[in-house]
Image (cartoon, rainbow, N blue to C red):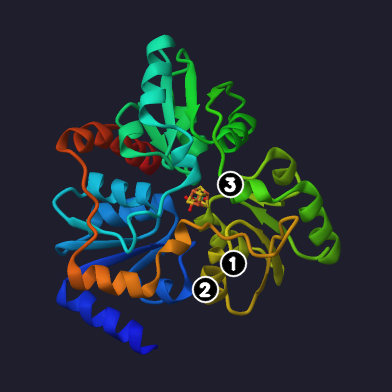
Amino acid sequence: MSPLQEKFLDWKKKRNAVVLAHNYQRREIQEVADYVGDSLGLSYAAQKAKGEVILFCGVHFMAETAKIVNPSKKVLMPDLNAGCSLADSCPADKLAAYLMQNPGLYVVSYVNCTAAVKAQSDVICTSGNAEKIVNRVPADREILFLPDRNLGDWVMQKTGRKMRLWDGDCYVHMEFTASSIDHIRKEHPEAPVVAHPECTRAVRALADEVCSTEKMVSFCRDNPAKSFIVVTEEGMLHRLRRELPDKNFIPGPTDHCACAECRYMKMNTLEKAASALEKLAPEVVMTPEVIDKARIPIERMLDWSRN
Ligand code: 13P
Ligand code: SF4
């Protein structure tokens, strides 16, 4: 353990804080977190968190979700500027205008959106439960799925249900191309390919498994193969290597490099995380009105994906 990790753990104890980290966080942060997981697992962990403080090491919409499901906690982030290109692609005012012009739509929002967008949604989903959630929407309602058109397309393929798709994407997963994945597959023909559903249809078609980051861990654990090609943000490799040290993980390359990094996830450093605990800032703040409105579709998701 590094001296900075020790300092961090001292502050965590002093603050009686629960530390939640997404699978894309830096390795030194994952090592000192109480829980490391995908968006769905992190939402449940936030709901159950005891103590006074949650330090959320992930991106802003995830920390907002933690605050919404457990509003009496002080929710801190290492860096409040850690946003998301998907969340940016669907501004709340643009959605409000669209819904005004297109009344009657059932809005299914991928969790990668702001609280103000969640507040206008009927139900939320994550990549871990999107298929299940869409299958629960009443059959007579037309669905608007936002903001990720690639995840929406994948859900349409899985469920056979036609949906209107918002035109957003994740800039990190868009960098993987069919030719870059085809190339690495030929180099490692023995290695199954696991890809995140935010990848394009052409990339997903080359994958043996398309799933959320959490499911990647169980897929690689249960599959007898020794090597895997992992087509998602590179932080995922830390989680996989820590949890499955006997297996070999090959980063899915883009056309330029073998290190697809989310610049937002990487804004969080252990130094900033320790400072957030020490200063009890920066804090994630929302109006009670947005919290109350956004909680309804999030709780609907948590209920629907439990049953
Ligand atoms: P997961 O919910 O699968 O962890 O995905 C979150 C995300 O931001 C993917 O880019
Ligand atoms: Fe958003 Fe993409 Fe980063 Fe995930 S990897 S947080 S979807 S920008």
3 or 1: tag closer to the N-terminus: 3
Categorize mark 2 by other alpha carbons within 10 Å: few (<14), some (14-19), many (20+). few
Are discs 3 and 2 less than 8 Å apart at CB?
no
**Residue type at tag 3:** Tyr
Q: Mark 1 points at which residue?
A: 221
What percent of the width, then of the height, locates residue 162?
Answer: 59, 21
- Nearest the viewer among 240 and 94 is 94
* Residue at position x 83%, y 63% in the image: 189
Mark 2–mark 1 distance (CA, rounded to whole Å):
9 Å
Quarter of the figure with the C terminus: top left
* Residue at position x 71%, y 72% in the image: 226
In the rendering, which numbered label is found on residue 171? Answer: 3
**Residue type at tag 1:** Arg
In the structure shown, which secondary structural element does the residue marked by tag 1 occupy?
A: helix
Are discs 2 and 1 less than 8 Å apart at CB?
yes
* In this rendering, the label closer to the viewer, 3 or 2: 3
Q: Mark 2 points at which residue?
A: 243
